[in-house]
Image (spheres, grey):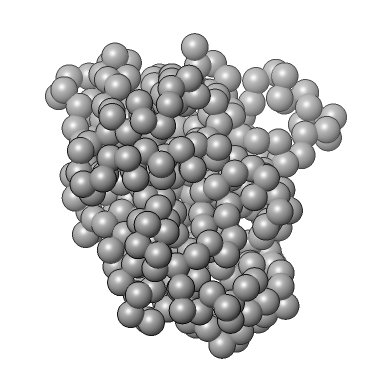
Amino acid sequence: MRKTARYASLAVSGLLALSSLTACANDAASSTSAAGGKGDGKGTKVKIMVGGLDKVIYLPAMLTQRLGYFDSEGLDVELLSEPAGVQAETALVSGQVQGAVGFYDHTLDLQTKGKAVESVVQFSHAPGEVEVVAAGKAADVTSPKDFRGRKLGVTGLGSSTDFLTKYLAVKNGVNVSEFTPVAVGAGPTFIAALQQGSIDAGMTTDPTVATILDKKAGKILLDMRTPEGSREALGGPYPSSSLYMRTDWVNGHKETVQKLADAFVRTLKWMSTHSAAEIAARMPADYSQGDRTLYADAIKSTLPMFTKDGVMPENGPETVEKVLKAFNPNIKNAEVDLEKTYTTEFVEAAG
């Protein structure tokens, strides 16, 4: 982890505890990799894969494009979309794109596989995820202790929603072999699975959550859209959505990475001073799925998860590691160097 002198001194003195949790859900109703947004064709070309462009947890990606901040930094950013964060990770590692917007936890998982990637802008300090239970099962599933024998929806197997679901189960005395994770994506596919009984409960994000509640198709079991909800469910702050990149690319393109950080931090600051309705008005019309008011409500519910400066929350990385070690044997038996999973070098220098 590269930090400014202030953070470096804290690390040296052992006073900086960083911890975070993961989850890369996909509330995108998108199919597979579809172009999401392009710049003005001028400036340095950068491709970024997002684990669901229309998901509110990844809202800063498209909002930065819509505000014109990439262009003003001299960047020609092309945003692409995959239905799950784990697929965005694959695109990054294979070199198809230069950056990925997804959950921070992928940086830890990839390190154990010999891949060096790091979060360069941390969008959030909470997962933004919600565990919802089907309306007809609400009386039977009242906590993660009731996951035993259930079919639980996740974005995709190996996704952050999969990771978080397993952690919640293990934390509450349910072995990962005692329930069935079901990959149902997000948006309409998730809602259909809930309504048709293909899953008893599942983890998803807004705007899917808002639509489920509006349709009375399910009820909230656990809400991790706020720092308080994250601490209650996971024991600490949970840095989730982020811009992460291959470390070798970051080291070789520092000027471009700084411009990306400048643009994203500018967006995060803009979000902190504008209402959910104002944010919704800036987003593509089809993201609201015909109900702009409901979409604005979804954004309002999720806004508490976002940072204002892109800096990794204190004690975040440790929380993520704790969560992953609870159920992931690859990480449980590995020595993870958390300082190499993120850097504050660029966001600390952002104007």
- Give coordinates of residue 199: x percent, y percent: 42, 78
Q: In which quarter of the image is residue 149?
A: bottom right
| Residue 349 as seen in the image, left or right of residue 155 | right
The residue at the far left in this view is: 41
Depth check: 347 or 141 in front? 141
Residue drawn at x 40%, y 53% as measured from the top left: 210
Residue drawn at x 76%, y 39% as measured from the top left: 17
Is residue 58 visible to us here?
A: no
- Give coordinates of residue 7: x percent, y percent: 71, 25
Residue drawn at x 21%, y 59% as measured from the top left: 31
Label count reads: 0
Quadrant into which the N terminus falls = top right
The residue at the far top in this view is: 351
Q: Residue 179, relative to residue 25: is it above or below?
A: below
Q: Residue 168, relative to residue 345: is it above or below?
A: below
Depth check: 252 or 329 in front? 329
- Give coordinates of residue 144: x percent, y percent: 64, 72
| Residue 275 as seen in the image, left or right of residue 33 | right
Q: Residue 7, relative to residue 83: is it above or below?
A: above
Depth check: 233 or 259 in front? 233
Is residue 214 visible to us here?
A: yes
Residue drawn at x 54%, y 16% as measured from the top left: 349
Q: In which quarter of the image is residue 183?
A: bottom left
Depth check: 76 or 213 in front? 213
| Residue 7 as seen in the image, left or right of residue 211 | right
- Give coordinates of residue 70: x percent, y percent: 30, 22
